[in-house]
Image (tube, rainbow, N blue to C red):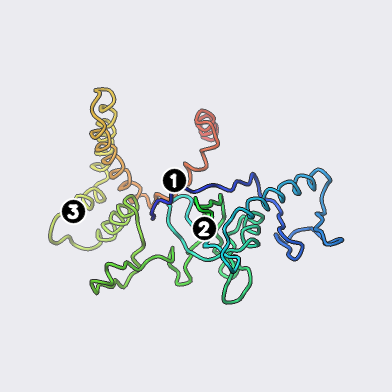
Amino acid sequence: MAIPHLHSLQPVRVSSPCRVSVSNQYHYGRSNFSRKSSSLVYASSTSNFDRDLHLQSKVETVLDSVKWDEKGLAVAIAQNVDTGAILMQGFANREAVATTVSSRKATFYSRSRSTLWTKGETSNNFINVQEIFLDCDRDSIIYLGKPDGPTCHTGSETCYYTPVLDLLEHRQDEEHKLALTTLYSLESTIAKRKEELEVPESGKPSWTRRLLSDEKLLCSKIREEADELCRTLEENEDRLRAASEMADVLYHGMALLARKGVKMEEVLEILRRRFSQSGIEEKRNRKSQT
């Protein structure tokens, strides 16, 4: 699914889940630390205590650099780490961001209730934060993470499903029309053609329907398109030709995934998990598991 690219963003990196406090008036992470002489003390070893204090100092420095508004808030956007979908937008203060760093769950500040709230605390559809970004002006924040389920209270995958141009033209679909980028628009179209297989075809013939209904044809086309992609390298064809052949490989590969009931998001999640692993090691592990 989704999304517009967001430029000039600066990551706030945290190496592992940790406990962070930004004020002696608050207590985060639902973990073991106690108040003593107006300071927070972790119930942990001395080395961990020193490490956590060092991290807390670094988090404080980053939070000091954010341009909070007059109410101490900044816009906070949650984005799907695998699909790029913009899931929701809320507001965060220092404590909300510190809690997110600590718990790795997207946490916001409720202006109506004047309190922190963690997305998923009632629905269990948490957003598991992998990274936090600040924009170039340091006045807005992105929580980049993996949602456990639908983000919107309506049950929609994201909170963004109302196209303004459709409203201006007085078109309103009964179903939610999610904000989709090219790849996920294609996946959505292929999924619709799969659903239509149960209904007799009428009107213009659909190549996608034909592929989905003929396993041998689909597999032969994937092999054919993959070979043509390789030949763009072997025969030194131009860049546009390579891009065109890759588009064909993607399309036909996604048709096969639809036949198998596999979503592109699952494929991208697997790729993300491989980022920190050597390709050689990954292939060796695959062989040992077979």
- Residue 82 in picture, x, y percent from top left: 46, 50
- In the picture as drawn, the residue positioned furthest to the left comes out as 203
| Amino acid on which disc 2 is placed | Ser
Instruction: Mark 1 or mark 3: name the one nearer the start of the chain.
Output: 3
- Residue 284 in picture, x, y percent from top left: 53, 29
Secondary structure at badge 2 equals strand
- In the picture as drawn, the residue positioned furthest to the front comes out as 70
What residue is at 48 percent from the left and 71 percent from the top? 153
Instruction: Mark 1 or mark 2: name the one nearer the start of the chain.
Output: 2
Distance from the alpha carbon under mark 1 to that under mark 3: 27 Å
Q: Which residue is mark 3?
A: 206
Name above or below for residue 79 compared with residue 269. below
Where residue 268 is drawn, which disc sits there?
1
Distance from the alpha carbon under mark 1 to that under mark 2: 26 Å
Q: Quadrant of residue 40?
A: bottom right
Q: On the rendered image, what quadrant is the N terminus found in?
A: bottom left
Secondary structure at badge 1 equals helix
Q: Which residue is mark 2?
A: 140
Give the mark count.
3
Instruction: Mark 2 or mark 3: name the one nearer the start of the chain.
Output: 2
> How crowded is the residue under tag 3: few (<14 C-alpha within 10 Å), some, or many (20+)?
few
Name above or below for residue 168 compared with residue 287. below
- Residue 78 in picture, x, y percent from top left: 50, 59
Where residue 175 is drawn, which disc sits there?
none
| Amino acid on which disc 1 is placed | Leu
| Amino acid on which disc 3 is placed | Ser
Q: Quadrant of residue 116?
A: bottom right
The front one of 170 and 149 is: 170
What residue is at 74 percent from the left and 63 percent from the top? 27
> How crowded is the residue under tag 2: few (<14 C-alpha within 10 Å), some, or many (20+)?
many
Secondary structure at badge 3 equals loop
Point out the frontmost of discs 1 and 2: 2
